[in-house]
Amino acid sequence: MKTITVVGMGYIGLPTAITLARGGFDVCGFDVNTAVLDSLRAGKLHIVEPGLQEALTETIESGRLTFSDTCPTSDAYIICVPTPFSVENGKRRADLKYVDSAAATVGRAIKPGALVILESTVPPRTTERMAKVLEESSGLSRDQFHTAHCPERIIPGQMLRELRENDFFLLPLQEISEVGLQVLRGETTLTPFGSEPLRLRHDDCLLVNGTPALHFFHC
């Protein structure tokens, strides 16, 4: 059985963790907010989302979903932390301090062969930045673990349905081995889209449902 740790139990991370647990994975929901963890361990939601309370109860009772303030060693990690804006010299920029902190925490726990997916909405080259933090905190070389970006594509009010039915792109920073791909294969819609590295120039633009989505991808 593959194990997955979802980092950040907010509006994206918690529904993602529940969906993966429903798909048959053993999932740990990691967060540094003890009040959030206490609530979830007691089976109570701290966010509002239709159908999520019943799904939370189901997955906790199945034993497939647990919560911790200590990041465990897992086969895969999905980072779902906030990326607020800061203002520098009058310009708005993504504040990546939570991504950096999450990557450093995961790096101290990962084992060779682990897959680390960044699902937070981030600017170009953030996956590369995350990989460097993982190298520094883990002591592993880049070829000893896998990294990828999975654009977050769900909206409040429809999260469980969209996590189950939407197509999700898994965009690797480097080639992902067959072992790495196997981590997310199973009874879930969170499946890889190719295993080859993706590189975009700043003048390239991808469309997601007709909307320019360059900011979702590293380049």
Image (cartoon, grey):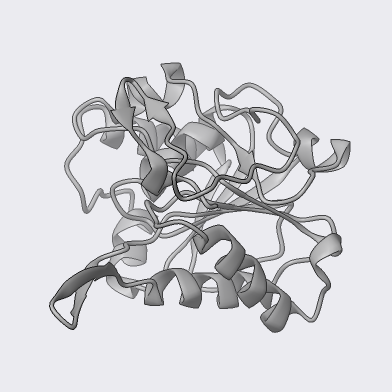
Instruction: Mark yes or no: residue 81 visible.
Output: yes
Work out which residue is located at the far left of the displayed protein and give it: 90
> In this image, 92 relative to 214: left or right?
left
User: What residue do we see at 73% from left, 67% from top?
Assistant: 110
How far from the left and from the top, in percent, is residue 56?
A: 37, 39
- The answer to whether 89 is drawn above or below residue 93 in the figure is below
How far from the left and from the top, in percent, is residue 85?
A: 22, 68
Q: How many marks?
A: 0
User: Splitting the image into 4 quarters, where does residue 53 fall?
Assistant: top left
User: What residue do we see at 63% from left, 21% from top?
Assistant: 187
Tell which of 188 and 101 is nearer to you.
101
- The answer to whether 55 is drawn above or below residue 43 in the figure is above
Instruction: Mark yes or no: residue 1 visible.
Output: no
How far from the left and from the top, in percent, is residue 1?
A: 77, 38
Tell which of 111 and 134 is nearer to you.
134
How far from the left and from the top, in percent, is residue 47?
A: 20, 48
User: What residue do we see at 39% from left, 27% from top?
Assistant: 207
Work out which residue is located at the far top of the displayed protein and give it: 165
- The answer to whether 121 is drawn above or below residue 131 in the figure is above
> In this image, 41 relative to 172: left or right?
left
